[in-house]
Amino acid sequence: MTFTSYPFSSSPLSTEAQYALTASRWGNDGVHTDDLSSTALKVTANGTSSVSIAAGSGFVNGATVENDGAYSLSVVSNSGGASARKDLVVLRYDASADSITPVYKTGGSTAPTLTNSPDTGVVEIPLAEVTVAAGASVVASGAVVDRRWGVGRPVSYGTATSRPPSRKGQLRVEGNDILLGDGTTWPYVGTAGDPAWSTYNPVWTAGADTINFGSGTTKGRYKVMGKTCFLEIQVIPSTNPGADTDSLNVTLPVAAKGVVRDLFTVHLESSNGEGAWNGVAMIFPSVSLTKISRIRINNSDGQARNMLTNEPINFRNDDILTISGFYEIA
């Protein structure tokens, strides 16, 4: 047994089998299309004894096939059959015939299997499954099921400041971030590995008033995974902000999608002898998608009350308020 390598000056790529072995790894087998809602090589029927394959191109075992117009392929009759028969329309790569051609393969109660024998030079990929009714020699339009494999484009690499036009179904990598083209933009999918926490400065307000808890006393951190933002906020006042009659609000690091009211857990612990309190914080989509609009604390009578700067407890020096949870982003 020996190792063979090519193409080199002394050992060029010289056979069809060598080319197929090499080129078949350049791309996946399938129909060339960014979106399977396209008609590229799509099979349709109209109640006759043939099916039609639309124009398009594809890739099979390292070779390209192209159809430049509607192509008619005869259906094998099931006139003597006692039950419906499931068939396949395939593209067949045949090294001995030097071609890729559409082939109608008959099955039975299940569709026939695909041939995948690159060593012997025959590889098939499906275009459609066709059901021929018992005793029939024609195929109704609803009896064809699309079985095409789509082949898009290779992964694109780059930065957010230098993006090519979006291609539907194409993956793009920017650093550790993964995006998926939709044909218009490059929506974010996720980050490879566990993304690190990022910090931000939450801004506290009550109505039109900005609340000052003292310098460096409020902290916020977050990380985004897919369409989910994980959030933690903590504030330990170093000064008493005084009384305000409006509910406390705090900004979010990333805008919420706002499908429902997102909830966060709240724990408020007094360092001034007023005990510990639990509650929830909420994003109200009807009010704002960029902030938590309500913090509600369960008071001693079991009723939830909106948190103000001095209600239901007087929030002041060295008290600790923690908000944590996650929410859906746009």
Image: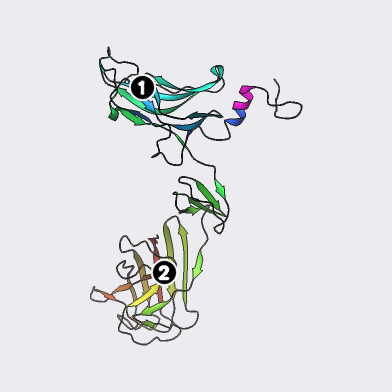
Mark 2, residues whose alpha carbon is within 10 Å: few (<14), some, or many (≥20)?
Answer: many
Disc 2 from disc 1: Cα separation:
56 Å
Residue 315: say if magenta. Answer: no
Task: Name which residue type carries label 1.
Answer: Asp
User: Which residue is identified by label 1?
Assistant: 87
Answer with left or right where residue 175 lies relative to residue 135: right
Residue 182: image x %, image y %? 44, 49
Task: Name which residue type carries label 2.
Answer: Leu
| Among the 4 quarters of the image, the one containing residue 319 | bottom left
Count the numbered circles shown: 2
Taking the spot 37% from the left edge, 87% from the top edge, the residue there is 242
Report whether residue 110 is seen: no
Please give the range of residues in magenta.
Answer: 12-20
Mark 1, residues whose alpha carbon is within 10 Å: few (<14), some, or many (≥20)?
Answer: many
Q: Nearer the viewer, residue 253 or 315?
A: 253
Quadrant including the C terminus: bottom left
Q: Residue furthest front?
A: 69
Report whether residue 32 is seen: yes
Taking the spot 29% from the left edge, 17% from the top edge, the residue there is 137
Residue 16: say if magenta. Answer: yes
Q: Nearer the viewer, residue 60 or 69?
A: 69
**Which element type, helix, strand or loop, lies under badge 2?**
loop
Q: Residue 252 got which mark?
A: 2
